[in-house]
Image (cartoon, helix red, strand yellow):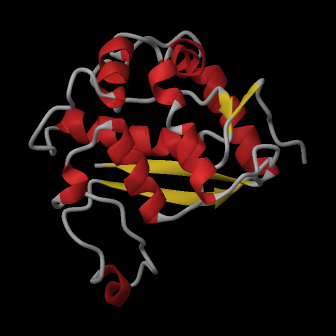
Amino acid sequence: MQIETYATRWVPLESDPAVMNSLATLLGWKDVESKLQFCDIFGLDDEMLAFVPTPVLAVIMCHPITQETEEAAKAQDSEQEGSTADEGGPFFIKQTISNSCATIAVLHSLANCLASGHASWQPDAQSPLGRFMRHSATLSPSDRGLYLERKNPDCDETNSIGDVHQNVIDLVSPFYFITFVD
């Protein structure tokens, strides 16, 4: 199986709520200190789900890359080609940076939480999240990915979160993160 790689590479982030909360804070998320934060889900049965704080606004899942998932992603890409901004749907960013799926999953979680009105605040206009949201609001999902890659040095600092936890930029991970939003 050939895993898709990209010209730009970031350090992959580990599947750890502390790492994702650090990234959210770096981006300008203010609710991390209060009630809205990332946590582990240890199972999907009722007993394990009882440990998950509520409300649950997004779920990020680490999923293996398989031939089937690669084919499904390519089919989805061809369906979305030429699409415009979200038009009332979820805020979506097409990944154009290798190993950026965790960062994009966090951005999807935060952006959709803000868009749905679940957050009690808006990001500071000068925070990386505020600048990214403002500059990419009218862009297509593909153009958002390119903006994040090429024109948004503010979010480049998010790559440093991975440096703190692991120094493996040449790793091509056989896993990716996907986000389910409320």
In the displayed structure, 143 sits above or below 119; it is above
Residue at coordinates 67% horizontally, 44% vertically from top-left?
11
Q: Position of residue 26 (x, y in %)?
A: 38, 42
Q: Residue at x 47, y 28 (%)?
A: 155
Q: Residue furthest bottom?
A: 47
Q: Quadrant of residue 34?
A: bottom left
Q: Quadrant of residue 156?
A: top right
Specify the quadrant of the image occupied by residue 5: top right
Residue that lies at the very extreme toward the right in this rendered image: 1
**76 lies left or right of 113:** right
Q: Is residue 156 left or right of residue 31?
A: right
Q: Identify the residue at image location x=44%, y=54%.
A: 20
Q: Position of residue 93 (x, y in %)?
A: 49, 28
Above or below — where is 56 with respect to 180? below
How far across and down, in percent of the image, does residue 57 sit? 27, 54
Q: How many marks?
A: 0
Q: Is residue 135 left or right of residue 165?
A: left
Relative to 142, residue 59 above or below? below
Q: Where does residue 117 sit, x and y in percent of width and height?
A: 14, 38
Depth check, front residue: 70 or 101: 101
What residue is rendered at 39% in x and 15% in y? 136
Q: Residue furthest left?
A: 120
Residue 138 can be seen, yes or no? yes
* 84 lies above or below 182: above
Question: Can residue 93 be seen by looking at this rendering?
Answer: no
